[in-house]
Amino acid sequence: MQTIYEDVDNSFWIGCGNWSDSNPSKGGLVHYKSEKEITVYTVSDGLADSRIRDIYRDRHGKGLLWIATADGLSSFDGRVFKNYGLQDGLSTDIINCIYEDDLGVLWFGTNGGGVAIYDGNNWSSIDTEDGLSHNNVMSIYQQPDGTFWFGTAGGSVTKYKNKKVRSQSLITSVLIKEGELRIGTQRQLFTDCGS
């Protein structure tokens, strides 16, 4: 099991499959409604790949379930899978994480392609050529002021705001003190992830 997502109806979506296993027939997407109502979806059902890394249902769009896999991205409307890959504008086929911003734009952390961004019609990306600290993006977070933070496999974090990389630093420590998040880097201390 790689990831679990609780849906709006309190059912669970479970992403299975050994991420390092090159056999896409192992694993799949499990929808658990109750002990008597379990459905498993695999590539034979239309899923891009059975090695699943992250699952997310969009809030602002069509209510699609998005599935990040080791060989592409899938959306699922409850009946049909639609798959996205390099031919659609993704920067790579390996998707690590999914994030939706307040405007309904979907951000995908990729393995080797930086951050892929989908506004519902068009794809764009941010990578090391744009100032991203590393192209293996493992996590994405947005603050209320619109600042994005990208956590990378390189052990660093990139701060991104107003379509510009603001800083990048190697994380050396993380601490929550008196309810405030503090991230220590080689260059500075970020308090409450704000400055």
Image: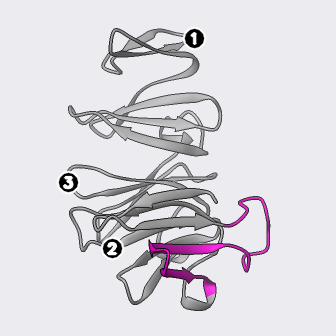
**Which secondary structure, mark 2?**
loop
Residue holding disc 3: 103
Q: Answer with mark 1 or mark 3, whichever residue precedes in sequence.
A: 3
Residue holding disc 2: 64
- Kind of residue sitting beneath label 2: Leu
Q: Which segment is the magenta one?
A: 17-43
Query: Residue 74, position in %: x, y?
Result: 48, 74
- Residue at image x 45%, y 84%? 81
Query: Residue 141, position in %: x, y?
Result: 38, 39
Q: Quadrant of the N terminus?
A: bottom right
Between 117 and 178, the residue placed more toward the observer is 178
- The CA distance from mark 3 to mark 2 is 15 Å
- On whether residue 16 falls in the magenta region, the answer is no
Q: Answer with mark 2 or mark 1, whichever residue precedes in sequence.
A: 2
- Kind of residue sitting beneath label 3: Leu
**Residue 147 placement: quadrant:** top left
- Residue at image x 34%, y 9%? 178
- On whether residue 23 falls in the magenta region, the answer is yes
Q: Are marks 3 and 2 in contact (CB under 8 Å)?
A: no
Residue holding disc 1: 186
- Residue at image x 55%, y 44%? 137
User: Which numbered mark, 2 or 1, is in the foreground of this view?
Assistant: 2
Between 38 and 73, the residue placed more toward the observer is 38
Q: Is residue 93 visible?
A: no
Query: Dot 2: few (<14), some (14–19), or many (≥20) neighbours within 10 Å?
Result: some
Query: Residue 63, position in %: x, y?
Result: 27, 71
* Rendered position, 25 above or below 22: below
Query: Dot 1: few (<14), some (14–19), or many (≥20) neighbours within 10 Å?
Result: few
- The CA distance from mark 2 to mark 1 is 40 Å
What coloring was used for the rendering? one colour
- Kind of residue sitting beneath label 1: Gln
